[in-house]
Amino acid sequence: MADMLGDDAPAPADPATLRARALEVVEAERYLVLATVSPEGVPWSSPVWFAHDGLAAFYWISRPHRTHSVNITHQPRVGFVVFDSRQPAGTGLAVYAAAAVGVAADDELDTGLAVFSERSVAHGVGPWTRADHEGSGLSLYVARPAQLWLLPGAGTDERVPVPLS
């Protein structure tokens, strides 16, 4: 039981190893669970299909009137986690983030859509272009982590800080 409580947590790895392992986890998954809060302080979590630019930017497309999108308008700081929910108890791998988020600005829309489209094509969904985006009623959101942590799957609940660069 000591392992499950984190008493025997492994020593932190070097920064490059931590970043590589975190990126492996992010690459392997398709959804992140986004945690937002309403103006009244009511928490809300939503799974969103995402694309990413390394560990620096996470993108998803959503309707602006959805609860999580409305919450982001009022509070542009979020938490999210990317994890494999099929892992046995006590062995999970996960990447946690605290991030600033908002609708992608027009000057970053093409870059964000290219990242989103590349992952969409890789997962068999098809391309997503500016033409598809315009008039769709959807917004491209981008989250830029201010902090990252890795739950290394070592049988503990000990999150290890991951350097941003």
Image: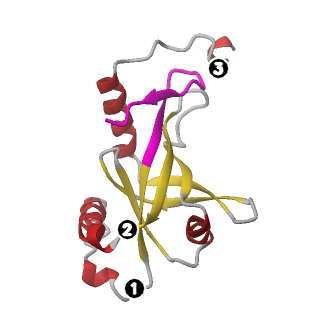
Rendering coords of residue 21 (x, y %): 35, 31
Q: Nearer the viewer, mark 2 or mark 1?
A: 2
Amino acid type at circle 2 is Ala
Q: CA distance from mark 1 to mark 3?
A: 46 Å
Q: Is residue 126 visible?
A: no
Q: Is residue 155 visible?
A: yes
Secondary structure category for the residue under label 2: loop
Amino acid type at circle 3 is Met
Q: Which mark is residue 107?
A: none
Q: Is residue 151 rendered magenta in the image? A: yes
Q: Is residue 51 rendered magenta in the image? A: no
Q: Nearer the viewer, mark 1 or mark 3?
A: 1
Q: Which mark is residue 4?
A: 3
Q: Which mark is residue 136?
A: 1
Circle 2 sits on which residue? 104
Q: CA distance from mark 2 to mark 3?
A: 40 Å
- Seen in the image, is 108 located left or right of residue 50? left
Q: CA distance from mark 2 to mark 1?
A: 15 Å
What span is in magenta?
145-165
